[in-house]
Image (spheres, rainbow, N blue to C red):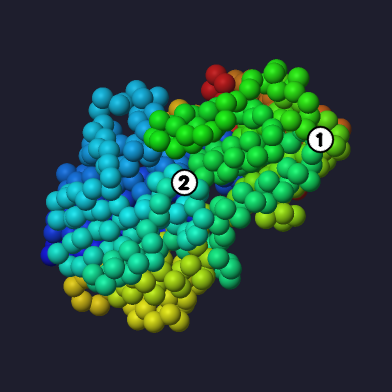
Amino acid sequence: MKPGKELLFCALGGSGEIGMNVNLYGCDGKWLMVDLGMTFGANEYPGTELVFADLDFIEERRKDLIGIVLTHAHEDHIGAVPYFAAELGVPLYATPFTARLVQGKLDEAGIADEIELHVIEHLDSFDLGPFGVRYVPLAHSIAEGNALMIETPYGQIFHTGDWKLDDEPLIGTPATEEELTAIGDSGILAMVCDSTNVFNHQASGSEGAVHRELLKEMKNHSGKRVLVTTFASNVARLQTLGEVAKASSRQLCVAGRSLDRIIATAKASGYLKDFPETVKFEEAMDIPRGEIMILATGGQGEPRAALARVASGSHKIKLESGDVVLFSSRQIPGNEVAIGRIQNQLADRGILIVTDRQSPIHVSGHPGRPELEALYGWLRPEILVPVHGEIRHMHEQGRLGRDNGIAKVVVQKNGDLVRLAPGEPGKFDEVRAGRFVLDGDIIAPADGEAIVMRRRLAHSGIVSVAVDGEGQVEIAAMGLPLDEDYDDFVAEASRDVAKALSKLGKAERADRIEAARLAARRAANRWCGKKPQVQVLLVGQ
């Protein structure tokens, strides 16, 4: 569809899930995209690395798409750019730090010459068709987290992006209460708002408080080698850790390519100006244990990250019994098993583990209820549209908004077409909003035959049946819990297949394949209770 004289909103990703944010605004015949993110592969998509929103709806309307505005540089907001930006064929807009990271992605993908990337300096406003856009800095767990003020002929939208309130930010200068109140005074039609931490009844906390707690931990573990793991993108935390290293008279060693990249990008953007010089791995191991702090990637249990290799003893950085690992990050849902595996490895070696459950060494980058309520009061929007959350998060924010005097709330999900103006706001249609996955080097439908079959194989195993022209049957099985019964199963299944085929005589090829398949599957079910996938090959027939 083509937007008429109206203001529309449609999320293709990030509404109904945390991550993979892709939002569309439609107005006077044109579409504007806000963010183009991804998420990481999950158990329901075995063998995949990345998950993307299905952009079919907007790809079919790319002639009406006028640009992609990126709020900040987290992967769930920019990670899909190198995979889809060239196909969409529209300019990108970002603030300097985000633009540098995006440029690196485009260079790595070899498509930098195909993409028009506009760097928005000094938070200057810019026009894109019927939309006027201005960045509004808000605190978050990365440099240059921004909301967007989007002006349209039908009213102003405040798109929060990811945000929090922080009285002691160490990076950047977020908008003040007075500035946000002035924005509210100008009239906000709709506030499209982050729902991630709506169930948290406390404010998310300040980076300044984390600074003090991390310094306290260093003093508690004097004489010990300390490794700290955190999100590489959290530039404020990197600033904190650099200051803590200096304040505790420890030299700093950095392990992880993503950390190296973020530190270099942050310095090029004017951040981390006083970040200490780092020492190499070998040098770090020669420094007295109480005089070194190691900063490493891998706090989410990533198997190839630095922390996983340190935990297994395969990294040049070595920890011993009595050393300490501080997890200065939250545990992302879905990563519990991977994180637990690494923590168990560390604990088995006598290494002390400290997480945010034992000490307040991490704060979230998303708003708790007190922060949401404060922003509602400052902006006073006519309409609240919760995004960036699972369904339960968004419905809860809807209730919170109503309790705080916002009369109109639209709780939508991926694929819902919402009309914000004119008239009563609400959903009026649906569009396709599926998922794609990066499977090897190919972007494929998440519900395609390959992924569905892979799930079935993982659950039930596979039996291969080959029948030659003489009627001889050969069977092989993988993934069935047969062990010492395997040979007996193969013999019986082979007899069953031969018997089923003999009854058919000279039947059609398709009928013979189906008879062999069913006979082998029934045999497997008798022997182990599984219903495996069965592949039949008729040779010379």
The quadrant of the rendering that contains the N terminus is bottom left
The C terminus - image quarter: top right
Relative to 153, 314 lies left or right: right
- Residue 385 relative to residue 370: left or right: left
Mark 1 element type: loop
- The front one of 103 and 217 is 217
Which residue is rendered at x = 27% and y = 58% of the image?
149
Residue 223: mark: 1
Q: Mark 2 sits on what residue?
A: 171
Residue 151, x across and y down, in percent? 21, 60
Residue closer to the observer: 472 or 13:
13
Residue 150 image position (x, y, % from top left): 25, 58
Q: Position of residue 130 (x, y in %)?
A: 14, 56
Amino acid at circle 1: Gly
Quarter of the figure with residue 96 = top left
> Compared to 343, does 26 lie above or below?
below
Residue placed at 31% from the left, 42% from the top?
A: 94
Residue type, mark 2 in image: Ile
Residue at the location (57% across, 21% down)?
539
Tag 1: Cα neighbours inside 10 Å, few (<14), some, or many (≥20)? some
Q: Residues within 10 Å of mark 2 (few under 14, many from 20)?
A: many
**Secondary structure type for disc 2:** loop
Residue 390: image x %, image y %?
50, 61
Label 1 – label 2 distance at C-alpha: 30 Å
Nearer to me, 249 or 428: 249
Which of the two labelled residues, at mark 1 and mark 2, occupies the earlier sequence position?
2
- Tag count: 2
- Residue 163 seen in the current view: yes
